[in-house]
Image (cartoon, grey):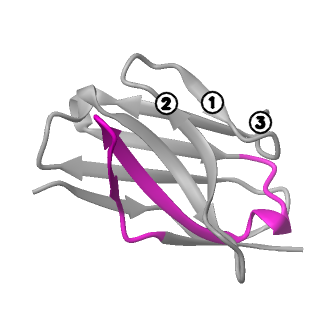
Amino acid sequence: QVQLVESGGGLVQAGGSLRLSCAASGSIFSLYNRGWYRQPPGKQRELVATITSGGITRYVDSVRGRFTISRDNAKNTVYLQMNSLKPEDTAVYYCNAERNGIPYWGQGTQVTVSS
């Protein structure tokens, strides 16, 4: 059974940094595309960043240059390094894994950025 567990969220002041982690179990995750999504209060879930099984990364415009997605296949873990955080980055952040069109989701971790 595929399981994703996020960690690293919390409260931080604007301009600060956080590092999210997502540990996966239950499959060979080096074969999976991985990603981070977020859901701000009162809004729909949106893409933040993705990284393919081959290491190609993609970012939404609002985080490019501030956030970095990476993966450690030996640990089945994907990371999201978030720098220069802004209040508008406040959201529940969700880890995603996808292969052959089948998505899997973590339970989410809250990130709150105070002004």
Q: Residue at x 70, y 81 (%)?
A: 41
Which structural element holds mark 1? Answer: strand
x then y, percent, for residue 98? 34, 42
Q: Earlier in the sequence, mark 3 or mark 1?
A: 1
x then y, percent, for residue 107? 37, 71
Separation of residues labelled 1 and 2 (CA atoms): 7 Å
Say which quadrant the N terminus sits in: bottom left
Instruction: Find residue 31 and report its image quarter.
Output: top left
What residue range appears in magenta? Answer: 83-108
Which structural element holds mark 3? Answer: loop
Please say whether residue 11 is visible from this viewpoint. Answer: no
Residue carrying label 2: 51
x then y, percent, for residue 22? 37, 52
Which structural element holds mark 2? Answer: strand
Q: Which mark is residue 64?
A: 3
Residues under numbered marks 3 and 1 in contact, where contact means CB atoms less than 8 Å apart:
no
Residues under numbered marks 3 and 2 in contact, where contact means CB atoms less than 8 Å apart:
no
Image position of 105 (left or right of 17): left
Residue carrying label 1: 58
Image position of 51 (left or right of 107): right
Amino acid at dot 1: Arg
